[in-house]
Amino acid sequence: MFNWLQKWVGSAPTPSASPSVAPHDTAATPPTDAAVPPAPLAVAATDWAPGGAGVADFNVQTASMRWVFSLGTVGGPQLSLGGLADAIERMSLDTTRAADWVPRVPSVLPGLLKSLRDEHSSAQDLALQIEQDVVLVAEALKEANSALHQRTTTVTQTSEAVRLLGSHGLRLLIARVAFRPVLGDDAGPLIRAGAPKVWAMGEACADCSKTLAPGRGVDPFEAFLSGLSLQVGQLVALRMADRVAHLARPDPHGLGPRSMPVGEVNTHASDNHAAQDMAHAMAILSHRVAARWELPDNVVGAITAQADVVAQRRWPEAAELLGVAQEAARLRVLDQAGKLPAPLADCCLHLPDDAQAWLLAPPKTKT
C-alpha cells in the first residue's frame, strides 16, 4: 500500500498579507490568521437552530473537531480545543518543521491522472502505470471481479480490469486508494484513533461532492477528488496533535514537565472560534499538499477557496460545493457515530435542498 504517511515534503513560505493565489505554486499559500476569510458555507462555523431539542447550541464543525481529535474522552489528550487550535496554527506556520508533517504524493498518482485526462491513452498504457504499485493492481482486480460487474469468469489481467472499469470507474478507484490513510509504525495514538474517522468523513465528502456536482456546474470527478483531498489537512493536524499531547505529558523520569514547542496560551473566545481557526489551518495544509501533489487546478482551487477569499471568487461554484459537502459529510458521520443531539433530519435544515436530499437518502447497498 502507498506509504505516503511516512514521507514528508516541505511547505510553502509564509505568505504575504494579500496573496495572489496560483493553485500549483506552493508559495501562494492562503493568508494566515491576520486575514481569515469567511467560510464558503457561512453557517458551517456558526451556531444554528433549525429546531429540535438540543440542536440550538450544537455546532457541527466544533463537534466534528472534538470527535476526530478525541478531546474530552477517557485517555484522550488533556487539552482544550482552543489550546490545540493554537498549537496546530503555530506548527503549521513553522516552515522549518514542515517536512515532519506534510505527506508526499504517491509517486504514481500525477502520471495516472494526466493519462486519464488524455483521450489518446490506451488501456495498456494505463495498465502499465497501475502495475507500478501492487496495491493499485490488487484493488483494480478486486473491483473488476466484484458483484457489481457480474462477471462469469475471473479477471486476472490488469489491462482487462482497466477496460472493464472504464475511465470513470478507474479514476474513482485510483482516488480512493491514493488517499486512504496508511499508518506507519511511528503513528501516535491520536492519529490511529482519528485517521479512520477522517477517512469516513473524506469518503462521505467525496460522495456528496460527486453527487451534487452536476446540478451545480462542477465536474463530478474533480468534485470527488476535492472532497477526498480536503481531508488530508486533518491527517497532518492529527500528527501535530500527537506531538503536542506527547510533550504535554509529565516527564517519566521526574524531571518536570516537558517543554512545548509552541505557545500554550488559549487566545480563542469559544470552542466554535477555535474550531473555525483549526479548520482554516487544516485547509491551508490541504492546499499545500494538493498543490505539491500536482492535482488538477480546479481541485486545488476549490480547496484553497476554503481559506482564501481570492480563490473563492475564482472558483465560486466549486468552493461552495466543497463547503456544503464538508458540512453534510460531518453530519452524516457524526450521525452514524451517535454524536448528534437530535435526529439527522432536524440537524440538517440549514443545508441546501440538494445536500439535505443526499443526507436523507437511503444508504447505498454495498456489493
Image: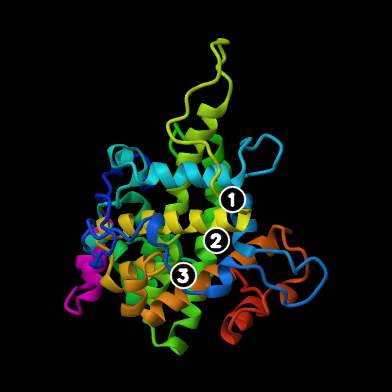
The reply to whether dot 1 and dot 2 touch (C-beta < 8 Å) is yes
Asked if one can make out residue 33 in the rendered structure from this viewpoint, the answer is yes
In this view, the residue farthest toward the left is 120
Closer to the eye: label 3 or 2: 3
Q: Earlier in the sequence, mark 1 or mark 2?
A: 1
The dominant secondary structure in magenta is helix
Residue closest to the eye, 32 or 212: 32
Give me the disc on residue 38. 3
For the point 61% across and 58% down, the residue is 272
Residue type pointed to by label 1? Val
Residue closest to the eye, 185 or 164: 185
Q: Which residue is denoted by mark 2 in the rendering?
A: 201
For the point 62% across and 54% down, the residue is 270
What residue span does the magenta drawing correspond to?
112-131
Q: Is 31 in the magenta? A: no
Q: CA distance from mark 3 to mark 2?
A: 22 Å
Residue type pointed to by label 2? Met
Q: Earlier in the sequence, mark 3 or mark 2?
A: 3
